[in-house]
Image (cartoon, rainbow, N blue to C red):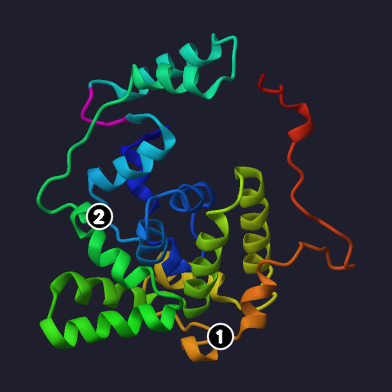
Amino acid sequence: MATELEQKLGRYVAIELEPKLGRYVATKLEGSLGLYVATELFQNVDTTLVHAFSSTLRCYLPKTVANPFHRLGMVEERIGKLLTDDPTVIEASLAQYSDLVYPDNTSVLHKIEMIDRYFGLDTVEEIIEAMENEVADSGNEWCKKTLKQVKEASPLSLKITLQSIREGRFQTLDQCLTREYRISLCGVSKTVSGDFCEGIRARLVDKDFAPKWDPPRLEDVSKDMVDCYFSPATDADDSESELKLPTAQREPYF
């Protein structure tokens, strides 16, 4: 489920960390749209892009509807009364409360071909180089804006996000949450870099919007540094501290 509050997901790559469920949903978007959303994360997300998220989540409740939070309560009550966890029944129930949103002329959904062309490339360096070439050749304003925002982000975070999105395409929600927990723990503990704290300082504390990323350049980010964020979580004494999910308590779907 999603509401237009999902628009507040934006810009977390700029502080070297983004919402876990937001990135999980991004892995399920078509083509390279998920990677674009996760790496560029612009502030003014249009409603049709939110709908792209919500089409994955099966239910979209726009704020333009009178009292959408009342409708959220109705959805919760409806799902709570179901006697099955059959996905088709759940989706049909959610559809009763969902609204369709159609892309206007300014929607990023009209940029899918360009997004796939650039964000479908293998590395962050290749993505940036391709957009730089496009800007040099045609002066494309969308590429220029996107390129600027990507370059403002943490180089380490960009590479972590690229790997996370691509791994997540083939993982379950449980696996994605475990992976994101590892990334979060490594970021907060400054095991590899202090970019998370530096991003918070630059955007939320001092608000100088001039973070000093470590490492400062993409070419300085090694594979070992990125891999560390995906390694099993451990405590200071090297004992395992992996995320524990209550999977055994779930009722089986028949």
Per the rendering, the mark at residue 5 is none
62 magenta-colored: yes
Up the image or down, 40 lies above or below 128; here it is above
Q: Quadrant of residue 128?
A: bottom left
Up the image or down, 28 lies above or below 37; here it is above
Report the number of numbered marks: 2
> Judging from the image, what secondary structure is the residue with disc 2 in?
loop
**Viewer can see residue 69:** yes
**Mark 2 surroundings: few (<14), some (14-19) or many (≥20) residues within 10 A:** few
Per the rendering, the mark at residue 221 is 1
Residue at image position (63%, 63%) is 183
Question: Residue 57, percent across and down?
Answer: 43, 36
Side of 140 where 49 appears, left or right: right
Q: CA distance from mark 2 to mark 1?
A: 29 Å
Q: Quadrant of residue 182?
A: bottom right
Give the residues drawn in magenta, as a range. 61-65
Q: Are marks 2 and 1 in contact (CB under 8 Å)?
A: no
| Quadrant location, the N terminus | top left
Up the image or down, 104 lies above or below 76; here it is below
Which residue carries the number 2 mark? 44
Question: Residue 8, percent across and down?
Answer: 36, 49
Residue at image position (70%, 75%) is 191
**Mark 1 surroundings: few (<14), some (14-19) or many (≥20) residues within 10 A:** some
